[in-house]
Image (spheres, rainbow, N blue to C red):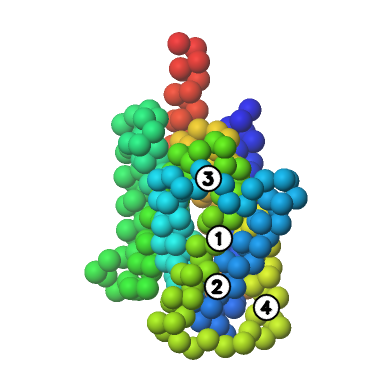
């Protein structure tokens, strides 16, 4: 039952993240990425602080001074920075498609770090998924976009964040983890803005868009964190592929994007590998219960 609840939460979180991406991409047409990170990080931090206070939880908990939280914070910065740059500079559907490698990295990390059993069939599916990512990236071929490598950085950062979340002290709530994740975006954005310059007072449409991005981002972040701590990593993470479906729809409807054949083929391979990984994980779990 915990795996089912975690899977539903993961799907809902992916829908929220896709809407967050859409609003951030729209804001990036008028504002620099550093400023977006600052505003988004501040909004998310304040929202999670309010939730923590309402639940009677401590904003600063002694358990934050641990290696998993430090690693999570660093990975959060790398993931958010890389992916925000990617959706600002490349089509939303392409960036989201490449990001789908995250569950593959998480499943592999769960096997290597937490000792979860991943057999050769799932390793083969992971390899196939990475091949799908390469088809989308097209390194060394016509159509390769260097800015898409920012998505690779984001993917690695988000995978590390999810694994570190799994290792975080159980005494820390999902709300507290949300505070520590979002607060890291404020100095990161400020440092980036100081380096690039170009800051501007956001107009009402950009402020509204970032407010909505924060709303959906906070809800999605909470759902993702809860899902990762609720069930088995190897079972829950494949549902992250639903983000691609949401992103494809938004990319076409909102930004007029037209995904090309390599992108669709690579995405299909990634989704197929994820679905196989999920099915295989369930079969292994059933066999273990019968044994």
**Badge 1 or badge 4: first in the primary sequence:** 1
Which quadrant holds the C terminus? top left
Q: Residue at x 62, y 52 (%)?
A: 59
Compared to residue 288, the image places residue 266 above or below, namely below
Secondary-structure class at tag 1: helix
Q: Which residue is mark 2?
A: 38
Q: Residue 123: image x %, image y %?
A: 33, 37
Query: How far, Cα to Cα, is label 1 from label 4?
Result: 18 Å
Q: Residue 286: image x %, image y %?
A: 50, 20
Q: Which residue is mark 4?
A: 207
Q: Is residue 245 visible?
A: no
Q: Residues within 10 Å of mark 3 (few under 14, many from 20)?
A: few
Q: Are marks 2 and 3 in contact (CB under 8 Å)?
A: no
**Badge 2 or badge 3: first in the primary sequence:** 2
> Quadrant location of residue 280?
top left
**Badge 2 or badge 1: first in the primary sequence:** 2
* Closer mark to the observer between disc 1 and disc 4: 1
Relative side of 4 to 164, left or right: right
Q: Is residue 67 visible?
A: yes
Residue 102 shows which numbered tag? Answer: none
* Closer mark to the observer between disc 2 and disc 3: 3
Q: Residue at x 67, y 74 (%)?
A: 209
Relative side of 39 to 63, left or right: right
């Amino acid at each position: 039952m915990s795996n089912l609840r975690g899977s539903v939460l993961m799907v809902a979180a992916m829908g929220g993240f896709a809407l967050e991406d859409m609003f951030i991409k729209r804001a990036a047409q008028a504002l620099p990425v550093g400023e977006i990170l600052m505003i988004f990080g501040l909004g998310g931090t304040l929202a999670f602080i309010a939730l923590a206070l309402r639940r009677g939880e401590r904003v600063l908990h002694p358990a934050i001074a641990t290696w998993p939280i430090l690693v999570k914070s660093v990975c959060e910065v790398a993931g958010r920075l890389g992916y925000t740059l990617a959706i600002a500079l490349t089509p939303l559907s392409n960036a989201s498609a490449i990001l789908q490698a995250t569950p593959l990295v998480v499943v592999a990390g769960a096997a290597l770090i937490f000792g979860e059993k991943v057999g050769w069939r799932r390793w083969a599916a992971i390899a196939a998924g990475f091949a799908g990512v390469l088809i989308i990236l097209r390194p060394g071929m016509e159509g390769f976009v260097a800015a898409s490598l920012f998505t690779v950085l984001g993917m690695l950062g988000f995978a590390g964040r999810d694994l570190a979340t799994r290792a975080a002290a159980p005494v820390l709530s999902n709300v507290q983890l949300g505070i520590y994740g979002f607060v890291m975006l404020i100095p990161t954005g400020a440092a980036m803005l100081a380096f690039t310059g170009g800051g501007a007072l956001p107009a009402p449409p950009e402020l509204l868009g970032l407010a909505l991005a924060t709303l959906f981002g906070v809800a999605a972040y909470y759902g993702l964190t809860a899902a990762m701590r609720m069930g088995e990593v190897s079972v829950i993470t494949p549902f992250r592929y639903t983000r691609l479906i949401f992103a494809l729809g938004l990319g076409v409807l909102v930004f007029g994007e037209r995904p090309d054949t390599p992108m669709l083929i690579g995405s299909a391979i990634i989704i197929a590998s994820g679905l196989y990984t999920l099915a295989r994980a369930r079969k292994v779990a059933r066999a273990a219960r019968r044994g």
